Structures are given as C-alpha cells and as structure tokens.
Image (tube, helix red, strand yellow):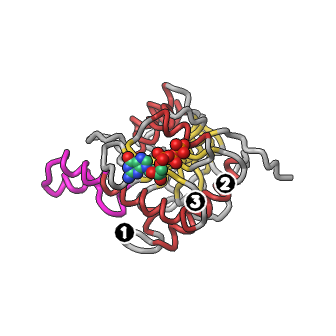
Amino acid sequence: MINEKPKYKRILLKLSGESMMGKKDFGIDPDFIFYLGNEIKEARKTGVEIVVVVGGGNIFRGVAGSKEGMDRTTADYMGMLATIFNGMALQDALERINVTSRLQTAFEIKEIAEPFIRKRAIRHLEKSRIVIAGGGTGLPFITTDTAAAMRALELNCEAIFKATGVDGVYSKDPKKDKNAKKYERITLEEAFKSDDIGIMDNSAIDLCRSNTMSVVVFNIYNSGNLKRAVLGDNIGTLIE
Ligand code: GTP
C-alpha cells in the first residue's frame, strides 16, 4: 500500500541540462519540460517542498568551451546563463499547469528573475511555491552538482534528488556493462571513494558527505518516479 505522506519535508531536485532536451540533440524541448513540470506538480501534491536546480549542458558547457580555447571563466559564466534559460523554460511549463514558482538567480538579472535571497526562498517554499535556483552559485569553476549541494544545504533540504536516465547507482556503467549491479543503498563515503561511481562530481559528493546530506538517484524518464521517491519508495539508489 502506498503511504501518501512524504518521507521528506523539503528536497532539492537536480535536473541535468540534458533532461531539458527531451529527444532533441540540443536546446530545449518544451514538450519534455512540460512532462517534467507535471512530474514536479504530482510530487508537490504530497506536500513536499521543492527547490529545483537545473544544469545548462543542453545549451552550453563551460568546460567544453574552455577546451576549445575560450577563457574558462567566460565559458563558465555562459554556462550559468544557460542554466537560467532552462530555469525560465521550466517556470514557463509550471505556469502553464498552474503551479506557482519563483525563479531566483545567483547573480542579478532583475528584469528577468528575482535575485537569490536565502530567507526569501525559504518563505516561497513555505508558501508551497517551487523555487528554481538559476545561475549555479554565480561563481566559475563550480559545477551545477556542487551548486545543487550548496543550495540544498543552505535551504535546509533533507535530500538531493538527482534525476538521471538510469534507475540508480550501478557498480559499472549499465549502458556499457550488462553485469553491472544496481545498489539500493550506499554510503556517501563509498560514493566519494569509488572511482566507478560517477553520479556527481567529487566536490559535490564531498559537500554532501561532510554535511550528511542524502542523495536519492532515480530515473526521471519513468513517469511517477519523482513522486514515488518522495514518498520513500525504493525506486532508485539512496546514498546516505
Ligand atoms: P510574497 O511577498 O510572499 O507574496 O512573495 P511574492 O514573490 O509574490 O512577492 P513579490 O511581490 O515580491 O513578487 C511578485 C512577483 O514579482 C513574483 O513573480 C516575483 O518572482 C517577481 N519578482 C520579485 N522580485 C523580482 C525581481 O527582483 N525581479 C524580477 N524580474 N521579478 C521579481
């Protein structure tokens, strides 16, 4: 029997930039973002408060830009702007299904979004609004996974829900090795030390590890998974 009470009071949902592409090769797929909005809406109905951090790799990836000769800091700022594009697209999708949200950015572009103000973000969450944190941390050389870990910690979230295209954490890459074994539960220490578990970069996992922030890894492409994970169903991997 499904217990409809959420296991968590407040979570941070980390969406990759790739997830905004849907089936496209680049950019934004409004249909898929509409699907993501509905997944968030269903999860929100359980009463859980949701902060969302979106990556930007579907539009621009700072590391890739710098490999092609760009200044790394400039490239990273472009990547941060890409996360704001995605945040705007997600907010648009949420508005279309009557889910109230607030987009807050790590650096000011006031004509477009609110600046990130921690206590204001918390008030929005308490009023059942989805808070979309755009622009990463506002600092170069930092991934959006690390930004997600930082926002989750400062907004007192109980867990990071890392949305992926696989069902959880495997011993090897399940797309390359059919003998890969899925873990139901591992420790943050194991995730940090293992070279084979690449679910988040090490600085993000290290932040979680040193501050005991759990990470739930789950497949966002299966409809209903986000809600089930919020309810505490064992559908992915719990890193704690
Ligand atoms: P409450 O005070 O709790 O009711 O929150 P609120 O967000 O509804 O109040 P506010 O009147 O501050 O915001 C109304 C709308 O303006 C919301 O959609 C905000 O996201 C938006 N908003 C607030 N501050 C800014 C800003 O600095 N820039 C932009 N672009 N929008 C803002």
Residue 61 forms part of the magenta stretch: yes
Label 2 CB sits under 8 Å from any ligand 1 atom: no
Q: State the image quarter where residue 42 is shown.
A: bottom right
Q: Marks 2 and 3, how far apart in space?
A: 12 Å
Callout 2 amino acid: Ala
Res 121 visible = yes
Q: Residues within 10 Å of mark 1 (few under 14, many from 20)?
A: many
| Image quadrant in which the C terminus is located | top right
Measuring 42% from the left and 44% from the top, which residue is drawn there? 145
Compared across the picture, whether 16 is left or right of 82 comes to right
Specify the label residue 27 is tagged with: 1
Q: Secondary structure at mark 2?
A: helix
Callout 3 amino acid: Ile
Q: The magenta stretch spans which residues?
A: 56-80
Residue denoted by label 2:
43
Could you say where residue 239 lies in the image, as x and y percent from the top left? 59, 38
Measuring 55% from the left and 58% from the top, which residue is drawn there? 166
Residue denoted by label 3:
220
